[in-house]
Amino acid sequence: MRVKVKYLRHRSIWAIICLAAGLLLIAASSELPEHYWQQPSASSTKQHHDWSDLEKDLRPEACAQCHDSQFQAWKHSFHAHAYSEGLIGQFPGMGNHSRGNNCLVCHAPLKEQQYQSDDDMLESLKIKIRQPEGVNAEADLEAATVPLRHTGVSCAVCHVRGLERFGPPRMGSKQTGHIQTDVHGGFTANKGFEQSQFCASCHQFAQSNAINGKPLENTVKEWQESSFAAKGVTCQVCHMPHRRHEFKGIHHPAMVRKGLEINVKKSHGVAQIVIHSVGVGHAFPTYVTPKVVVTAIARDRNNIKVKQWQWEIIREVRYRAGAWEEARDTRIMPDERRLYRADQAPTTTTTVQFQVRVIPDAFYRGVYESLLAGTPSEKAETLLKTALKRTHSSEFNLFDDVVKLH
């Protein structure tokens, strides 16, 4: 989806990206300690345990010294890159660091990651331009020099509160509560880490700010209304299989392909494609940023194109007359089969080629193009150009097959 600039006012664009501010449904599992996701702080002035300097260090590189496998998976994830160029490139146009902090509620949630001033925010942007990676891939503590916010949704965001560690029960164990260990004063095992509601504070917006009756991000509710919830297939089952901290989603072709059954055939002389959502526990795609394009191309015996059909799978929103509105919602729900027919093909048609292309960052592309068409600051322009380039490189072909008609 190319966002129509006439529907977007530059001062309002940020709202669709950072709508989290004040709109999040804080719906963490009841299993979790109270206020676990409300202005979380990982550090502490209280000394409950004789923590070493390494144990006090909130950087993911510090965690990697003992939890290397988790770090190796996480460092390639979108959680590790949540403090992205496209996000922070919008901040100079917002006016002040407080609005930037509204976005960090999900992209860098810890109190220790928040901006302290406008100068702090601008300096952080400069560092991001100079050093794009927010984490040292080798987990070198001496080389890891960027501010903690640059690590995005890192280990401490989910697992550390007041320097105390929290996590799911050990594999194969149902024991919960505080478990004493030789490091960092033990940890608290909590079943909430294995429940979809754990993800809700960032992946489920409040109903009070819905667009056309649906919150902008409605992933957890979509899951709750699906057969996956009834079967106990949680977010973690698909996005953290075997507790791997990869968090794969719409940007990963193998992940997307695994969730869909796609078949083409000829029925009563008409070429058709069926997309069946068999392994996606929410709308496909969830959220408003991706677009999936289904194309059918009719060709004659000389392989010349004689007709083309195109359908888009998308939830399209736009800003007009001072408010956001939903233009269309053509997404595929869990377990749904969607049929697309290449009707009324010319009589000279011998084959119909079906293609499915995924554009994970379609909405963002339009936002960045619109912002760059304005008068962004030099720092913002540099960051937004980098982000725009990535929206193009993230596209991929998911499916390609041919139906013979004659």
Image (cartoon, helix red, strand yellow):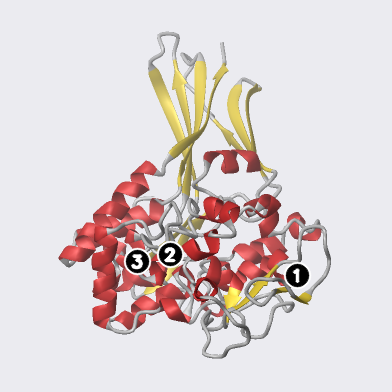
SS of the residue under disc 3: loop
x then y, percent, for residue 11: 27, 73
With respect to residue 188, does 128 lie above or below?
above
Question: Badge 1: how crowded within 10 Å, few (<14), some, or many (20+)?
Answer: some
Q: Position of residue 309 (x, y in %)?
A: 46, 33
Element carrying mark 1? helix
Residue 95 in view in this figure: no
Report if the CB atoms under discs 2 and 3 are less than 8 Å apart. yes
User: Which mark is drawn over residue 135?
Assistant: none
Q: Of tags 2 and 3, which is closer to the observer?
A: 3
Label 2 – label 1 distance at C-alpha: 26 Å
**Above or below for 113 versus 135:** below
Q: Quadrant of residue 198?
A: bottom right
Which callout, 2 or 3, points at the residue further toward the start of the chain?
Answer: 3
Amino acid carrying mark 2 in the image: Thr
Q: Is residue 381 left or right of residue 395?
A: left
The tag on residue 191 is 1
Q: Residues within 10 Å of mark 2 (few under 14, many from 20)?
A: many
Taking the image as shown, residue 137 lies to the left or right of residue 384, namely right
Identify the residue at horizontal 68%, vertical 65% (top origin): 196
What is the distance, in whole Å, between disc 3 and disc 1 at their CAs? Answer: 33 Å
Disc 2 target residue: 151
Point out the image quarter for the C terminus: top right
Q: Give amino acid for label 3.
A: Val
Judge left or right: residue 211 versus residue 150: right
The answer to which quarter of the image holds residue 96 is: bottom left
Q: Which residue is mark 3?
A: 146
